Amino acid sequence: MKYFSLLIALSFFLQLAGEDLRLDVMFTNDLHGGIDRYEATFMNPEFPPMLGGGGSAATYIKQVRKFSNGRNRDHLLIDVGDFFQGHPIGTVTEGKAVIEYMNMIGYDLTVVGNHEYDLGEEILREAYDLAEFPVLSSNIVRKGTTELVDYVQPYIIMEKMGVKLGIIGLTTTDTGKMSFPENIKNVDFLSAREALEKYIPLVREAGADLIIVAGHMGLPYEPEPAFEARYGNDAKPQEERYWGYDAQELVHEVPGIDIFFGGHMHKGFAEPWVDPANHTLVFQGWAYGSSLGHVTLKIDAETKTLSGYESPALREGVLITMFEDQFLPDPVIGDTLRKWQAMAEEGMDEVIGEAAIYLSRLGGGAQNLIGNMVCEAMLFGTDADFAFLNLGGIRGDIQKGYITYRDVFNVMPFDNQLVTFTADGRFLKEIIEMRVSGSRHGLRVAGVKVRFSKKRNNYDRVTDLIIGGEPWQADKIYRIATTDFLMQGNAGLALLTQVPESAITRQELNLRDVIVDYIKRNSPVTTRIDDRWVQDDKSDLSPLLREELQKSGEK
């Protein structure tokens, strides 16, 4: 705390000597209910530091606000979406606890994220009804119309130190492809680019000096190589891809944006990515409340234009990790959150089994230990031949040793249901081929052995395929296990919507409960990285696969 106070104080006294106004913008994205205290096992599995959640964030926010005087220094606190679904305190309370926390600490706004619809629009509306701050999105409309849904505003204009800030909200258009159709049956998600091209002039006409976009879409994991691959020396605009535009494309192709606060990608950047053409600053934080974003924007007092920015920490840049021992939780907010957390997590620390090894998300290609174990649990809970999940469907690790229900919740925080369906070998192979086409890298799987080559043409990349220990057969009917989320065509698996309802068995089992049952019955659980999924760019069709393809008329 002493280091933090000295740093902020130094920044404050230095700015008194300058002419620039300073706006401390603090930001969160992809909170996913991470307002609770939790151990940062992703930093150190053996000796994880404690993160203080919303209590520590409140301490930091209040400290920064002390330096505001409203004349030449002020502050702003924003959230960029996916606010509740992921930690028990958010999921169990259906988002209400997170909104109440945001009210207590005084957020200025939030943006609608894709996971906001995980429990349906009406439950989301009930949470938003509690908000004492505006909810922004300029591209969510009532289905079949151009009218924005009634729980959002497209933008707000706030005045700070005589400078008018026009803040436009955006929601990723892949929400329509990642949500259960029933949950979004009454809404449409319009092009983010078209929304910006519509609202930037309107916000300027309303008197905004600076344009800020708070958008639930993010930067590529490696921004510089991605930009070079997209544009290079060619300034031709990008076509809107299946998943819609990301933050990098928007700030490059839509002029007039001064600052963009992004999210959705769960990857934070200590410094902003700066678009080389429009010079827009793009900031993006980490997920689950592990850090708080904080940038001090420098604004020319005469022209009211952005003149630069300052980072509050030398080592962490604009992302401040919420270590509890550095930022002691605010006594009032911290105590309140601990009470809510205790109620939401009742029974979650009951031991259900044991892990013989550390089941980590680390790994190469489509395999990791936790993913392999989860798919093996799906096979165990059904009579399926093949089980699969999307690569991003698993959100936590399990440490070696005792396993609690909390551990399983962290692995599978979303309420996905287990589903099985029957299909012939051709359809099964098409699922796999789809997930290795283009730049895709596969699926989490069990019950199969897949070898593929990226040197081969799309939909002809699988060079060997074994199902249930036997060579793949085109005409054989297989039983396949997955989730209701994927059966709805999400995560790019639109072909699953072709499966007739008569071929689908809805197990009425929460995948989280299936994993718990597997752990109870198979402790100490273990698995390994094996040959279930192998990329071999030198491989050619195996004799058995070639023979079956020829026999079935595919080759």
Image (cartoon, rainbow, N blue to C red):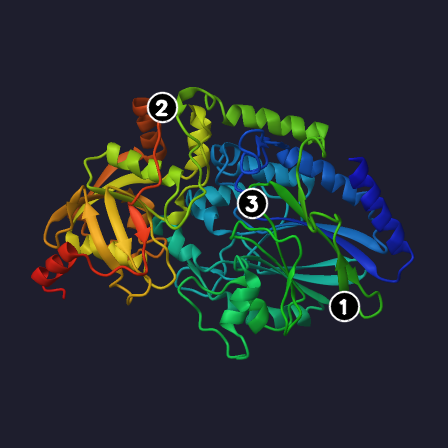
Question: Label 3 neighbourhood size at 10 Å, few (<14), some (14-19), many (20+)?
Answer: many
State the image coordinates of residue 135 (x, y, percent, origin top left): 58, 51
At horizontal 29% and vertical 45% (from top left) the residue drawn is 531
Question: Label 2 neighbourhood size at 10 Å, few (<14), some (14-19), many (20+)?
Answer: some
Disc 3/disc 2 C-alpha distance (Å): 31 Å
Q: Toward which corner of the image does residue 158 lie, by quadrant?
A: bottom right
Residue flagged by tag 2: what amino acid is it? Pro
State the image coordinates of residue 520 (x, y, percent, origin top left): 33, 23
At horizontal 82% and vertical 66% (from top left) the residue drawn is 300
State which tag comes first along the sequence, 3 or 2. 3
Residue flagged by tag 3: what amino acid is it? Ala
Foreground pick, 343 / 468: 468
Label 3: which secondary element: loop
At horizontal 35% and vertical 30% (from top left) the residue drawn is 526
State which tag comes first along the sequence, 1 or 3. 3
Residue ranking furthest to the front:
538
- Residue denoted by label 2: 524
- Residue denoted by label 1: 305
* Mark 3 or 2: the one toward you: 2
Mark number for residue 287?
A: 3
Q: Does residue 358 lie above or below 179 as drawn?
A: above
Label 1: which secondary element: loop
At horizontal 31% and vertical 31% (from top left) the residue drawn is 514
Disc 2/disc 1 C-alpha distance (Å): 61 Å
